[in-house]
Amino acid sequence: MTQAVWAKRDALTTMNVTDTDLLPLAEGAVRLKVESFAVTANNVTYAVMGDMFQYWNFFPAPEGWGIVPMWGHARVEASNCPDIAVGERVYGYLPMGTHLDVIPANISAGGFTDSAAHRQPMSMFYNQYSRLAADPEHDPANEDARMIFGPLFKTGFLIEDFYRRNDWFGADALIMTSASSKTAMALAHCAKLASPAVRRIGLTSSGNVAFVKASGLYDEVVAYEDVAASAPGAAVFVDFAGNAKLIHAVHTAMGDHLKYSSTVGATHVGAQGAGEAPLPGPQPVLFFAPTEALETIKALSPAGFARAVGGAWASFVASAKGFMKVEHRDGLAAAAEVFQATLSGQQNPDTGVVVRP
């Protein structure tokens, strides 16, 4: 028996924990038993943008339903692949569920790729699994941090690298929405390390201002309702909220001082496409991390990229322990509950949740 949480794709507030029979394991396949995963605003973005970026296609569900992708750890429960042993642990893209069958290819000591046919049209970034026994990024003491921050941190790293490679488009300030979100915090940390001369301005809800200030990642923290009064000079803008009214407010407040505008996520569910008047200044450009990762790896080399990310990651994990606590929950019903709290904006920003299904 296997369990998964099915989400209604056109009404994400509807989720059901569903039991199904495990199918016979295919030749060459490996069955992963999910041990744990983190539930974050990143998973909400996967669901909200599931059709646009084919996130629903990774873990098929019945028509009209979808399984939200998660990042987490799993153990090999059964194997028809001679190179992958039962009991081995892996890290990667998993369903909000208890099991996943993969067909390993490009197998090395450090990892493999799932070659299942239905996953090949999507970015290979999501099809790679790390074998923890030989994974240089694996630290047993920081498994929770990797699930909560890992993919989000790399996105933040890539955004900072993109802007720095473009000389910040002549700006001397970086404005970020959803400043309490983990990706924004990762970006702020990377900018603080690599571009300290660029002023980091975090926009957040009034209820999160104190938490965001306490993180120490931002030079200035501004509540959303005070955006119009903020005047940092020449700036670039990174939006993680996907809130059309907020984007319009920032563009209007900045006017000709805005040098570049990026959209990354959608943490403000229900506020996309609010039909505002045409935006002043540069039009927002979608930042898609897997595409930018290829450019950064090309510029730094794979080894150079790994070193750069590793160094920034180690310092971020150390600092995050000062402002983020981890809560462990058990069962898929808990996973659905945390997802709903995150979807509605009720999840505490100072708490990262790890679920053991």
Image (spheres, rainbow, N blue to C red):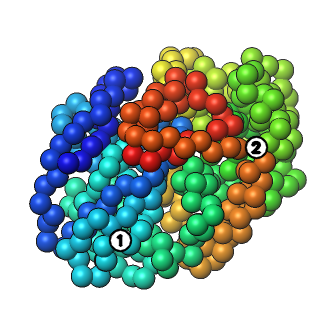
Three-letter code for the amino acid on which mark 2 is drawn: Phe
Query: Which label sits on residue 87?
Result: 1
- SS label for mark 1: loop
Three-letter code for the amino acid on which mark 1 is drawn: Gly
Residue 170 appears in the picture as rendered: no
Please state the horizontal and vertical placement of residue 54, each as a whole percent of the image: 33, 45
Q: Is residue 226 left or right of residue 20?
A: right
Q: CA distance from mark 2 to mark 1?
A: 35 Å
Graded by Cα atoms within 10 Å as few (under 14), some (14 to 19) or many (20 or more), the crowding at tag 1 reads some
Q: Is residue 125 left or right of residue 244?
A: left
Residue ranking furthest to the front? 330
- SS label for mark 2: loop
Query: Which label sits on residue 323?
Result: 2
Circles 2 and 1 in contact, beta carbons < 8 Å: no
Q: How many marks?
A: 2
Residue found at x 58% / y 66% = 140
